[in-house]
Image (cartoon, rainbow, N blue to C red):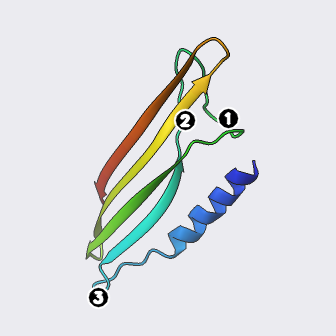
């Protein structure tokens, strides 16, 4: 639970530092996103005992006062074991958006 609180505080502080303007159009960020899964072997949704924090990068570009573009990606791993069966998988998540 302590990791969850620290992650939440870090994310809130990171949001306060984002301010693209016409003279400073780019921003680069580092993030650690928790990923959850719900599969036949088990469910890790809302299980904060072991967070799968996946590191990633975010790039933002100011276009005009009403629009900016965002590209973000995360690289990580999932793993689960219930004593009888287990799995381990790599994760690559990419997202783009414009607001």
Q: Quadrant of the C terminus?
A: bottom left
Q: Please identify the residue farthest to the bottom as the structure is shown.
A: 23
Q: Is the C-beta separation of discs 2 and 1 under 8 Å?
A: yes
Which residue is found at the position 72% from the left and 38% from the top?
49
Q: How many marks?
A: 3
Q: Please identify the residue farthest to the left as the structure is shown.
A: 63
* Front-lying residue, 3 or 61: 3
Rendering coords of residue 21 (x, y %): 33, 82
Give the spatial CA distance, label 2 vs label 1.
Answer: 8 Å
Which residue is found at the position 45% from the left and 30% from the top?
89
Give the spatial CA distance, label 1 vs label 3.
Answer: 43 Å
Label 3 element class:
loop
Q: Name the image quarter holding residue 62.
A: bottom left
Q: Is residue 82 left or right of residue 88?
A: right
Q: Is residue 64 left or right of residue 85?
A: left
The residue pinned by badge 2 equals 36
Q: Name the image quarter holding residue 25.
A: bottom left
Label 2 element class:
loop
Give the mark nearer the N terminus: 2 vs 1: 2
Rendering coords of residue 10 (x, y %): 61, 64
Which residue is found at the position 30% from the left and 77% from the top?
65
Rendering coords of residue 70 (x, y %): 32, 61
The residue pinned by badge 3 equals 23
Give the spatial CA distance, label 3 vs label 2.
Answer: 39 Å
Query: Marks 3 and 2: which is nearer the front?
Result: 2
Label 1 element class:
loop
Give the mark nearer the N terminus: 1 vs 3: 3
Rendering coords of residue 41 (x, y %): 57, 16
């Amino acid at each position: 639970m302590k990791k969850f609180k620290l992650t939440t505080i870090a994310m809130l502080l990171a949001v306060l530092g984002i301010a693209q303007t016409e003279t400073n159009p780019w921003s680069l960020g580092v993030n650690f996103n928790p990923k959850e899964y719900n599969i036949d072997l088990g469910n890790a949704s809302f299980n904060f005992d072991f967070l799968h924090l996946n590191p990633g990068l975010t790039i933002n570009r100011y276009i005009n006062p009403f629009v900016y573009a965002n590209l973000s990606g995360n690289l990580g791993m999932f793993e689960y074991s219930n004593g009888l069966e287990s799995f381990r998988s790599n994760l690559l998540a990419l997202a783009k958006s414009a607001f």
